[in-house]
Image (spheres, coloured by chain):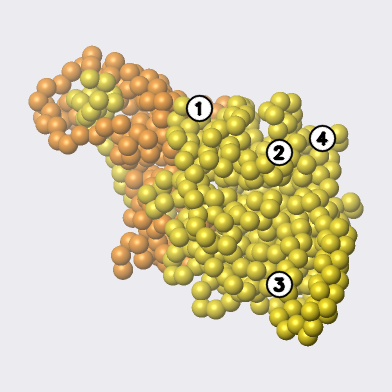
Chain colours: A orange, B yellow
Amino acid sequence: MDRRELVERAGRGDHDAFTVLATAASSRLDAAARLILRDRELARDAVQNCLVRAWRDLPGLRDPDRFDAWLHRLLVNACLDEARRRRRRPIEVEIQPIDDPTTNDDARRLADRDLVEQALARLDPEQRALVVMHYYLGYPLPDAARSLGISLPAAKSRLHRAMGALRRVLVADPVDGIDLEGGRTA
Amino acid sequence: MTAFDGFDLVDARVVGALDEIAAATRPDYLDDIFQVTARTRQRPRWTFFERWLPMDTTATQPVGRIRTPLRPIALLLILGLLAIVATAFIVGSQRHSLDPYGPAKNGVIAYGADGDLFVRDSLTGAPRLLAGGPDVQGGALFSRDGQLVAFDNVVGDVDHVMVAWADGSNPHRILAEPFLNPTAAWSPDSRSLVLTNESPNGDRTLWIAPADGSGARQIDLGNLVPYDAIYNPSNDGTILLRADSVVDGTDLYLIDETGRTVRKYNLPGTMLYGAQWELAGAAFSPDGKTIAHNAVEDIPGDTARFRTYLVDVDGTNQRELPAPPNAPVNYSQAWPVFSPDGKWIIMESWVGAPGGPSTNQIAIVPADGSAPARGIGPSLVNQGLLRDWSPDGTKVLVGVIDGNDTYEVDPVTGEYSKLPWTGDMPSWQRTAR
């Protein structure tokens, strides 16, 4: 059974088809939610709200091929809902275990991870949502802007500010020899 | 190189670091979620179509189809008969003529159930088939003159907009393209519909489609992305459009039928739920002088809420419709529908966060905002409510999205009764008094 048929079946009330789709998408949903919210429990709540809303509203999805984009949009909105709901609650920063680097590449990778994580912590949830949609989920900026309900100039401005913060910490710790492939433009 | 010029070294490091930080693995709480979804009912498909159709009922303007006698017995008799018919028609038109807006006599009620369209002569009358067959039909919407009915016809996975005579005869497509995430509203003269449509690649477009199927015309909106549109009751051909712009965000526009902007309203917004919901639910008062619309408002320390605002058609005097006294901060009231006489507005109200547990009820408020809103009809938990007035303004119909139950509500006393039939949100035909 192909993916399109699974979406169609789920939209007609086939819960087993929905569990297959949701399970396949869950890793990236959970990861994206943790990146945006920086809190494992809030991320769990956001993913649950996203999937419950997806199940409830799936009959209204007219184009099965847009399921992933639709699901990611639901997730980002659920994350921002959680962020707004808990705005006055302090966010508990999740501390990732530090692995022992075994090579220079590993050391660079881990250093980047820590630097980016520190920079992400300084961004607000709306900025993180845009960074995650564009750089982690891979959406072109116009699509990310539309999903977030903001204009393209606003998205560019927001991303510029977010990337400025990330650049400042990463440029202070430059790296050589990264093999770049492909291109991703706004 | 900037962040927008390409995929530079910093971009690459950010992407790699995000993958590292996120460390995507299958979450261990999925089974808990699936237990919740297994207990959750899906929304019926038609509610999505209905949601975007304006819920204001239609007015009747008798067309008066006259049959000329085909077999004359004698010239004098024919002339005499024609004179009698003409006199009767003129007198009848004067007696029964109605503006496209305003109170009217209640006609039949059309609704979709089990893939077919039905009509009932009254809320408790027996059903008759309006449109059936192997395809799926739903989302009926009578024209303002009550002579035509638009509906959604699904063949396979593709939806098409259809128009038929009010008795279901002569069904025909009015838009060649498939209908995706649509909105549809009748013109005051009942000769055309204004439609917003979405292509499979997500591009949204605005169309004006003659009801006779003679060919829909796409309206060039430049950089505006249309979400929904309704005609101005003044019948001057202008259309109230809710659209998004990369420069100006989401706003309401008054445009003419060529797409030229007559007025941009510059209404404030928060974009908390995105362009799909910003300034949604716009409705004209029957006299065309006032526009009611939703607004999404931030609640500090909590989620957002919806409220309804009025603004004069010239863009001035924006004011909020008052909520009930002692309403909690997360009380919402939105999706306004003017009564046929324009004196009252009903809205869907709820307490709770969108997507979370909520208590829903219909709220009614004087259209001039002179008194706070009050709840009428059933108060239901986690049930989205659709609403409409009877053409004579004495009843409110409430459709429950989940389960398709339908209630009849007295707008004065708030008393209600559940109707002995279910279906998608009905459309009530207006006829001459």
Task: Please give left or right for residue B149 compared with residue B341 in the image.
Answer: left
Disc 4 or 1, which lies upstream in sequence?
1
> Label 4 sits on what residue type?
Gly
Q: Are marks 1 and 3 on the same chain?
A: yes
**Quadrant of the snapshot with the N terminus of chain A:** bottom left
Q: Is residue B405 visible?
A: no
Disc 2 or 1, which lies upstream in sequence?
1
The Cα atoms of the two marked residues, 3 and 2, are separated by 30 Å
Disc 3 or 4, which lies upstream in sequence?
3
Task: Please give left or right for residue B360 compared with residue A158 in the image.
Answer: right
Residue under numbered circle 2: B292
- Pointer 2 chain: B
The Cα atoms of the two marked residues, 2 and 4, are separated by 11 Å
Q: Residue at x 58, y 37 (%)?
A: B255
The furthest residue to the front: B75
Residue under numbered circle 4: B369
Residue under numbered circle 1: B248
Element assignment for label 2? strand
Rate crowding at label 1 as few (under 14), some (14 to 19) or many (20 or more) other CA atoms within 10 Å: some
Q: Position of residue A24 (x, y in %)?
A: 33, 55
> Label 2 sits on what residue type?
Ala
- Pointer 1 chain: B
Q: Quadrant of residue A85?
A: top right
Image depth: mark 2 or mark 4 in front: 2
Rate crowding at label 4 as few (under 14), some (14 to 19) or many (20 or more) other CA atoms within 10 Å: some
Element assignment for label 4? loop
Considering depth in this image, is B342 or B325 the residue closer to the camera? B342
Q: Residue at x 67, y 38 (%)?
A: B293
Element assignment for label 3? strand
Q: Position of residue B404 (x, y in %)?
A: 66, 64
Q: Are marks 2 and 4 on the same chain?
A: yes
